[in-house]
Image: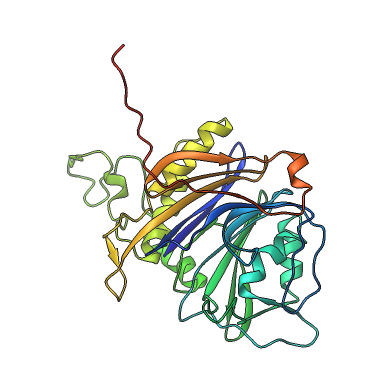
Amino acid sequence: MCTAVSDHGCCHLFGRTLDIECSYGEVATVTPRNFRLDFLHEKSVLTHPAIMGIACIRHDVPLYYDAINETGLAVAGLNFPSNAVYHAPKCGMHNVASFELIPWILSQCETLPKAIKLLQSTNITGDCVSAEMPATPLHWIIADKTGAVTVESVASGLAIYENPFGVLTNNPTFPYHQTNIANFMHLDSRPSQNNLCPKLEITSYSRGMGALGLPGDFSSSSRFVRAVFAKNHTACANTERSAVGRFFHVMDSVCVPSGCVKTDEDKDVRTVYTSCANTDTFTYYFTTYSNRRIRAVHVRDARLDTRELLSFPLQDDEDILYLEPS
């Protein structure tokens, strides 16, 4: 369970929620320009744009959940069980394991059109990180300030869909979400109008009735609709700070409180973290389940030229400011 959003206002913001039942030791991670990126079937990339996001690091390999590069491109991988199909390596194609796709794209592409062109010759394989970490079924949203696409590796091959909503959740496939959204095109943040029987005087008994029917459950299709609604109706902001605050409020509409969703094994799912990256300034903001204070990573040029990964703990302890009387 996850939700990703790409939003264009006074700056391009991109982020996601990670909704799972446990933590895998994820940390905010910067892959500097000279960190060697090795791929199972492709040549290593020795120099590249710096990459920043949240990752699980295994054997000095950053397994990114979502990330941006310093040229303004962003990618997030979201759970896509029962639909994702990875393929054996194919001749004449770039063969990239699913866990390699984010650094593969962000290390070689500065813009969304370049990412699309690279993807058109890319085959996603089902190679595992290790015997203990099988390939996770994923689909991806890729975005920059010009737009967004959804990428799905399915039985017929790699599908690339233009994503005008700038939103992605989980199953079913993206074409379903495109169709399903029409069921909610009547939703509005303004007061509801009496279209039922205009000759009678019927008045609303509450504010917010224009959005009557907005789904409130935590299913992927409902979160998709709710994220689209919140993104398009939340008041605009004109500074980076206010835009970041606005973005986190949008993401609040799809966050999962622990215990409201359970796995088949009766484990509690929760929003482990929420991210918001400003791709214009290469700044990565995040909150965690138990610490809702917004924290930011903004690395200066000198450290971006190193060869070692930079990591920052998420600090998941609740941060409460106790006020003293004036």
Task: Identify which residue is drawn at 37% across, 47% down.
Answer: 290
Spot occupied by residue 107 in the image (x, y as percentages of width and height): 75, 60
Q: As drawn, is 281 to the left or to the right of 165?
A: right
Q: Give whichever of 201, 55 is nearer the camera.
A: 55
Q: As drawn, is 1 to the left or to the right of 206?
A: right
Spot occupied by residue 163 in the image (x, y as percentages of width and height): 58, 61
Q: Residue furthest top?
A: 326
Is 194 situated above or below 261? above
The quarter holding residue 248 reads top left
Q: Give whichever of 10, 47 is nearer the camera.
A: 47
Task: Identify which residue is drawn at 71% across, 71% down.
Answer: 119
Q: Give whichever of 234, 169 is nearer the camera.
A: 169
Spot occupied by residue 217 in the image (x, y as percentages of width and height): 30, 60
Residue 47 seen in render = yes
Task: Identify which residue is drawn at 45% across, 68% down.
Answer: 170
The quarter holding residue 42 reads bottom right
